[in-house]
């Protein structure tokens, strides 16, 4: 027993030891089966493989396995080294006995965790290309029937491209196994056209069996399925994709497949060339990014080969917009017309255009719509279905790029838009009514129609007349129009809509015209009468009736004259006369006028010929209103039947045409308007009052529709002129030139010489302008006072109305000289001088003792001697009296010129000049002085004077200290009479300064004198232009206080001494001064 | 008959079989009569004017077509199938009838091709480019008129008018292979170019025909034709 039990224990231990070993654990010796591996593909069975040594490779193997001790061992013989056995729940004991050796038995214990789970390699059922869309469709079976329900399956799909099988995409795909074999499908769109090169697809799977404890792994990759590119086809060539339609903004790839021996020159998209990528020896590609919309015929993709051309056309456009403003209505209850706005154009045309379809959900009916893409007239018709009022439409829009839709729910009984009525005709008419008939196509039996008739004529506004009519099925409708005007041409047209639910009016029907027949005139004409100037006959006037009153064409007027109901005379006056004359003598009658047309006569208009006498008839002025003439009058209580304002239009030479206007008796004001009134034309009105007995002239009125400025200026003349006044007279302006009521005259005057270029006085802005406004129209003359004598004045006279000023009339007048003023101007200074002389004499006489004592006493007192004091001051160098400065004036050169024949006057002048006097004592020779002209030269003084030149005198002219040398010399020098002067001057002093050319051309300079100047005689060193008449403010006048100063005396610039003594001034000619004024009288002082 | 066959075996060659169906349109005056000569001259001069106008219109259409289709005006295009080439060898040696028959065959082919182009144009563009469609239709009309004019000339010469290919075959011609858009564009370009060439050749042919025969005063073709 123990032995047995111990044996059993030993055996059990051995078994345990064996079990503790891993599978493939060798139990036996080398050469026995080893490396037992078990893999399951379906979680039910596992495939176990093992290795055997070379000795046991050929022979049968006994394979036994048992899951536990209780189950019997399963054995079977196999010649292969792989068996498929069920997967144990926990572990399995495998015994492998090779028959080749005597004892080659191995036993393996395999646990579940030792079994690998590798799904079966998937099998691609199909790989289908869709070349236009470059899409691959892959189909395979998930083989789910062998797995328990609900396992997660993960699939890995690989896309490979080109001959080199470059992986371009690897994606994962998830599915759930349902214990059934399910065919899975997957699409992939290539960015490269499938024709460009070969594409390959492989797949493998991984099943996530969470209950399985062993290692799990991906299946093997399936064999690659291939979609061969065109570059593998012999002779295959072209540009791909072929004629695609793509959305704007897409990135596109085009390839050019060609023969191997061909070379590509370039590839262009549109007009642009792109860089090529080589896909294979026979395929090249370009990539176009962000494609823009193509033109109508598409964008060409051209592949230029060395000896050929391949191409494709790509159409780039937009997916359709959702239709906007979808609206449906029925014109006739037979068809529903839906309209919409398509939105953005797709840019695709022809067979690629956007297509529309209308689907009605209630009925399930679908219609396709023919839409004109270019005219954008988007209308689609849908038939009206029986017993269906509400329609639920879906408008579907699609094109090759995309699709959109829009929906609308509509009750068509509320969306009735009939077509324009047809066959509008006039079925009857008389003078005031017209019957119309028209036809509307449609089934309107269940609704009422509201029709609108438009009535228009040339002399009335457009009128609309509404008619509500019960609808019928494709029927005619009638209506009658009343209260029309006789003899009037009417234009008529009709439009209709639904009366129950107004939606829209139809279009207007074609118009028809109808003229109503004539009727007798509505009233008698407006009449007036006037006695002829002789008083023997009566002229009757009438106004034509308006078009709305004639009721036909007026053919004549019948004028009758009744006296106490007895017909005196009857005249029929044919159109177009509007007056007639009746011989009445001095008697009166009642005039009756009747207008006649083809339909009859008007009621008569009556007026009496009696004209009541009037007295104190005044003439008033009317007010111009611009567009009419405002006439007003007092109220006359006894004028019981109103007032008549009568006037006359005159046009040219023709007799004026009478016109009038009647007013009720309570009127006192009227604005008379007429198209014949013209601005600026005077019209005469007569106001008549109406009494039961007849008409009475109340007053006359003149007026203008618009007042204008007078057309011409009044003619005026200067009647009388004095030294301080002018008397002006003017004439009336003719009435027709007044063009308004004259308000007055404006007389303007100002000083002014006659000058054609001078502007008008009123426009000149002359500050001295004086204006006299003469409002008294009776005044025809005016005296202008307070004028200056001997002065030219410009006078202007203008008339004015309310419309403005007339153009001016101008005159120039010179006032007479004022002799009294001249006399006074002379006498007053003389009197003043005399008075001063007398006063001085009296003063001297009274103070003679003092004077004598002071100035020349009998015994002179040197200290009191003013004269000596004076001289002493000079010697002290008083600078103020420069002419007496002797010390600095040391002659540095004295030139003595001997004259053969001296001009006595000049000689005298020189000899008598103060400078000469001062020189004489130094020379000490009187005889020399008679024969020589001595000129001293004092440089320091010159410097002193010239060093301060005036800045305002151009040309470098020095101060004018030589006063009037020219005017003084000119009369004295007479070359014709005293030619010897030439000799004196030619040999004389040469100037240190050239005379200016202007100086040579001074007025009165004879040619001989000019020659003298040229021959370098004496010339002052100053610009002769600056020489002028001595005036108090001239430089010479500075020294005028000095006794030696002399106006108008020439002096040397060197010596500053006057060359002519003052006394010679008396002989010198007076300055030429053409004008004389009172100021000159005081300023010139010629005798001072 | 031999002459006719020879004429039609020129590059187009499509009308050789149609000569079987020559109709006996011999209603005109005899070919040699003075009135027939005058009429032929008149027909020739009118034909020259027609061809000249057609040439100008085709050149304009060609410009518009190239621009509208986005093609390169200088692109070389293979000869269009079904159109006899305008350029032939030994043109001088051709008889008048040969000239007329070749012209007629060419213009009948152009008529069919232009009609096809017009149809494709409408199909592809819809109403988008109506101007080109109108110009195409105008040229098609001129081509039809010119073909009719050629038939008149053939009748004048007492020649039968060959029937058109489509009339003879009961089942009609096999449908042309479906071309891509680009191929259609190129084919259109080729058709118009060749038509422009043919218009020039037709003017020359008609001038040749209008020359009075030195022997009879009639067209040279009349004397040479069997």
Image (cartoon, helix red, strand yellow):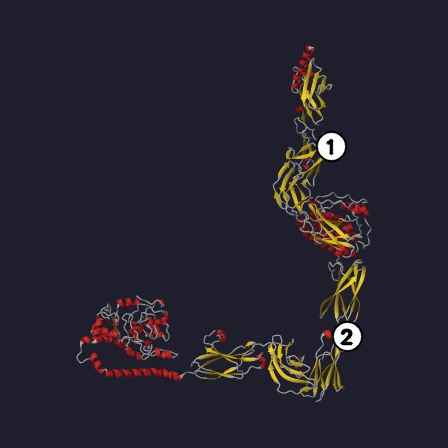
Q: Is residue B211 visible?
A: no
- The quadrant of the rendering that contains the C terminus of chain A is bottom left
Q: Nearer the viewer, residue A169 or A104?
A: A104
Residue at mark 2: chain? A
CA gap between label 2 and label 1 equals 102 Å
Disc 1 packing (10 Å; few <14; some 14–19; many ≥20): some
Q: What element carries label 2?
A: loop
| Residue A159 sits above or below residue A448 on the image | above
> Which residue is most to the bottom?
A586
Q: What element carries label 1?
A: loop
For marks 2 and 1, give the one nearer the viewer: 1
Which numbered marker is on residue A279?
Answer: none
Disc 2 packing (10 Å; few <14; some 14–19; many ≥20): many
| Residue A611 sits above or below residue A242 on the image | below
Q: Nearer the viewer, residue B63 or A470?
A: A470
Examine the image and state in which quarter residue A933 appears.
Answer: bottom left
Q: Is residue A62 visible?
A: yes
Examine the image and state in which quarter residue A66 appears.
Answer: top right
Q: Do the residues labelled 2 and 1 touch (CB within 8 Å)?
A: no
Q: Nearer the viewer, residue A392 or A277?
A: A392
| Residue A80 sits above or below residue A737 on the image | above
Q: Tell me if A988 is positioned left or right of A306 in this view.
A: left
The image shows residue A220 at horizontal and vertical percentages of: 67, 29
Which numbered marker is on residue A181?
Answer: 1
The image shows residue B59 at horizontal and vertical percentages of: 68, 51
The image shows residue A268 at horizontal and vertical percentages of: 63, 43
Examine the image and state in which quarter residue A434 appears.
Answer: bottom right
Q: Earlier in the sequence, mark 2 or mark 1?
A: 1
The image shows residue A922 at horizontal and vertical percentages of: 21, 72
The residue carrying mark 2 is: A519
Residue at mark 1: chain? A
Q: Nearer the viewer, residue B222 or A1073?
A: A1073
């Amino acid at each position: 027993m123990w032995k047995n039990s111990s044996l059993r224990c030993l055996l059990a231990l051995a078994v345990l030891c064996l079990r503790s070993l891993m599978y493939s654990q060798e139990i036996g010796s080398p050469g026995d089966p080893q490396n037992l591996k078990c893999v399951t593909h379906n979680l039910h069975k596992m495939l176990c493989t093992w290795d055997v040594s070379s000795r046991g490779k050929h022979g049968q193997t006994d394979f036994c396995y048992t899951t536990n001790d209780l189950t019997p061992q399963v054995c079977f013989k196999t010649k292969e080294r792989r068996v498929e056995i069920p997967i144990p729940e926990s572990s399995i004991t495998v015994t492998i006995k090779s028959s080749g050796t005597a004892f080659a038995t191995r036993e393996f214990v395999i646990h579940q965790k030792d079994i690998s789970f590798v799904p079966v390699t998937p099998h691609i059922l199909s790989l289908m290309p869709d070349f236009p869309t470059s899409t691959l469709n892959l189909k395979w079976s998930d083989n789910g029937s062998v797995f328990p329900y609900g396992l997660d399956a993960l699939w890995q799909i690989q896309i490979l491209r080109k001959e080199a099988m470059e992986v371009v995409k690897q994606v994962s795909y998830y599915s759930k196994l349902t214990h059934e074999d399910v065919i899975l499908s997957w699409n992939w769109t290539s960015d490269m056209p499938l024709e460009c090169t070969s594409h390959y697809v492989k797949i493998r799977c991984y099943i996530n069996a969470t209950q399985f404890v062993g290692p799990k792994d991906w299946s093997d990759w399936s064999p690659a399925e291939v979609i061969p590119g065109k570059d593998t086809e012999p002779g295959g060539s072209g540009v791909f994709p072929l004629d695609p339609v793509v959305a704007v903004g897409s990135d596109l790839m085009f390839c050019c497949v060609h023969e191997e021996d061909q070379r590509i020159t370039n590839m262009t998209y549109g007009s642009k060339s792109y860089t090529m990528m080589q896909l294979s020896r026979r395929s090249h590609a370009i990539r176009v990014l962000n494609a823009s919309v193509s033109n109508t015929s598409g964008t060409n993709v051209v592949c230029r080969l060395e000896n050929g051309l391949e191409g494709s056309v790509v159409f780039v456009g937009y997916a359709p917009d959702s239709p906007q403003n979808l609206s449906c209505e029925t014109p006739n209850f037979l068809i529903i017309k839906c309209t919409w706005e398509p939105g953005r154009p797709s840019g695709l045309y022809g067979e690629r255009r956007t297509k529309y379809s209308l689907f009605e959900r209630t009925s399930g009916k679908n219609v396709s719509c023919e839409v004109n893409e270019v005219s954008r007239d988007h209308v689609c018709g849908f038939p009206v279905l029986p017993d269906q009022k509400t329609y639920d439409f879906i408008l579907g829009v699609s094109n090759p790029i995309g699709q959109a839709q829009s929906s609308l729910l509509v009750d068509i009984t509320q969306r009735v838009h009939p077509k324009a009525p047809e066959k509008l005709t006039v079925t009857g008419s008389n003078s005031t009514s017209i019957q119309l008939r028209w036809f509307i196509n449609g089934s309107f039996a269940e609704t009422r129609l509201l029709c609108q008739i438009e009535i228009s004529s040339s002399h009335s506004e457009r009128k609309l007349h509404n008619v509500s009519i019960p609808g019928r099925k494709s029927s005619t409708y009638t209506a009658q129009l009343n209260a029309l005007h006789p003899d009037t041409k009417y234009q008529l047209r009709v439009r209709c809509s639904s009366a129950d639910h107004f939606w829209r009016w139809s279009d207007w029907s074609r118009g028809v015209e109808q003229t109503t027949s004539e009727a007798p005139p509505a009233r008698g004409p407006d009449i007036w009468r006037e006695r002829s100037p002789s008083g023997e006959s009566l002229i009757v006037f009438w106004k034509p009736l308006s078009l709305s009153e004639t009721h036909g064409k007026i053919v004549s007027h019948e004028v009758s004259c009744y006296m106490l109901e007895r017909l005196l005379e009857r005249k029929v006056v044919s159109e177009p006369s509007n007056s007639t004359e009746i011989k009445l003598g001095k008697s009166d009658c009642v005039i009756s006028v009747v207008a006649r047309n083809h339909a009859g006569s008007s009621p008569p208009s009556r007026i009496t010929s009696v004209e009541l006498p009037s007295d104190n008839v005044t003439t008033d002025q009317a007010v111009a209103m611009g567009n009419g003439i405002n006439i007003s009058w007092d109220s006359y209580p006894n004028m019981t039947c109103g007032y008549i304002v009568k006037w006359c239009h005159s046009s040219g030479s023709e007799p004026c045409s009478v016109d009038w206007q009647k007013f009720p008796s309570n009127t006192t004001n009227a604005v008379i308007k007429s198209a014949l009134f013209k601005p600026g034309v005077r019209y005469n009105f007569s106001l008549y009052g109406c009494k039961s007995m007849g008409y009475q002239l109340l007053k006359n009125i003149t007026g203008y529709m618009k007042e204008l400025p007078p057309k011409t200026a009044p003619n005026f003349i200067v009647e009388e002129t004095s030294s301080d006044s002018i008397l002006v007279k003017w004439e009336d302006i003719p009435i027709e030139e007044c063009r308004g009521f004259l308000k007055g005259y404006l007389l303007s005057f100002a000083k002014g010489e006659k000058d054609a270029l001078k502007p008008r006085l009123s426009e000149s802005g002359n500050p001295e302008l004086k204006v006299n406004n003469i409002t008294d129209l009776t005044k025809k003359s005016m005296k202008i006072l307070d004028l200056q004598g001997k002065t030219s004045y410009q006078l202007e006279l203008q008339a004015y109305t309310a419309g403005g000023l007339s153009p001016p009339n101008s005159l120039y007048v010179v006032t007479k000289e004022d002799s009294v003023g001249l006399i006074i101007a002379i006498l007053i200074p003389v009197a003043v001088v005399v008075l001063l002389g007398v006063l001085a004499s009296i003063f001297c006489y009274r103070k003679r003792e003092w004077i004598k004592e002071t100035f020349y006493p009998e015994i002179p007192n040197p200290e009191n001697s003013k004269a000596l004091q004076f001289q002493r001051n000079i010697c002290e160098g008083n600078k103020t009296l420069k002419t007496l400065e002797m010390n600095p004036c040391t002659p540095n050169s004295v030139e003595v010129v001997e004259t053969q024949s001296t001009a006595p006057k000049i000689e005298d002048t020189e000899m008598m000049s103060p400078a000469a006097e001062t020189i004489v004592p130094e020379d000490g020779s009187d005889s020399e002085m008679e024969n020589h002209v001595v000129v001293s030269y004092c440089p320091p003084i010159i410097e002193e004077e010239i060093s301060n030149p005036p800045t305002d005198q151009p040309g470098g002219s020095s101060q004018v200290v030589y006063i009037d040398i020219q005017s003084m010399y000119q009369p004295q020098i007479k070359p014709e009479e005293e030619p010897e002067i030439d000799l004196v001057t030619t040999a004389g002093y040469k100037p240190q300064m050239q005379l200016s050319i202007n100086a040579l051309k001074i007025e009165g300079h004879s040619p001989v004198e000019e020659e003298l100047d040229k021959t370098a005689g004496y010339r002052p060193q100053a610009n002769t232009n600056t020489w002028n008449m001595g005036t108090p403010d001239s430089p010479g006048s500075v020294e005028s206080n000095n006794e030696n100063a002399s106006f108008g005396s020439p002096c040397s610039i060197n010596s500053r001494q006057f060359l002519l003594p003052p006394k010679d001034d008396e002989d010198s000619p007076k300055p030429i001064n053409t004008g004389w004024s009172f100021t000159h009288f005081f300023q010139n002082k010629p005798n001072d | 008959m031999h002459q006719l066959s020879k004429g039609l075996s020129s590059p187009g060659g499509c009308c050789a079989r149609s000569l079987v169906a020559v109709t006996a349109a011999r209603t005109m005056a005899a070919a040699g009569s003075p009135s027939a000569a005058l009429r032929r001259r008149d027909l020739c001069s009118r034909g020259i004017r027609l061809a000249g106008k057609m040439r100008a219109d085709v050149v304009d259409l060609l410009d518009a077509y190239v621009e509208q289709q986005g093609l390169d005006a200088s692109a070389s295009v293979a000869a269009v199938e079904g159109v006899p080439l305008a350029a032939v060898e030994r043109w001088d040696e051709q008889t008048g009838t040969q000239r007329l028959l070749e012209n007629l065959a060419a213009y009948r082919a152009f008529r069919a091709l232009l009609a096809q182009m017009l149809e494709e144009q409408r199909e592809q563009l819809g109403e988008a480019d109506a101007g080109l469609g109108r110009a195409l239709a105008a040229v098609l009309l001129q081509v039809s008129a010119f073909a009719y004019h050629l038939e008149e000339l053939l009748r004048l010469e007492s020649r039968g008018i060959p029937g058109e290919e489509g009339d003879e075959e009961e089942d009609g011609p096999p449908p042309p292979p479906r071309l891509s858009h680009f191929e259609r564009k190129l084919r259109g370009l080729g058709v118009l170019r060749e038509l422009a060439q043919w218009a020039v050749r037709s003017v020359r042919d008609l001038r040749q025909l209008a020359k009075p025969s030195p022997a009879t005063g009639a067209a040279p073709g009349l004397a040479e034709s069997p």
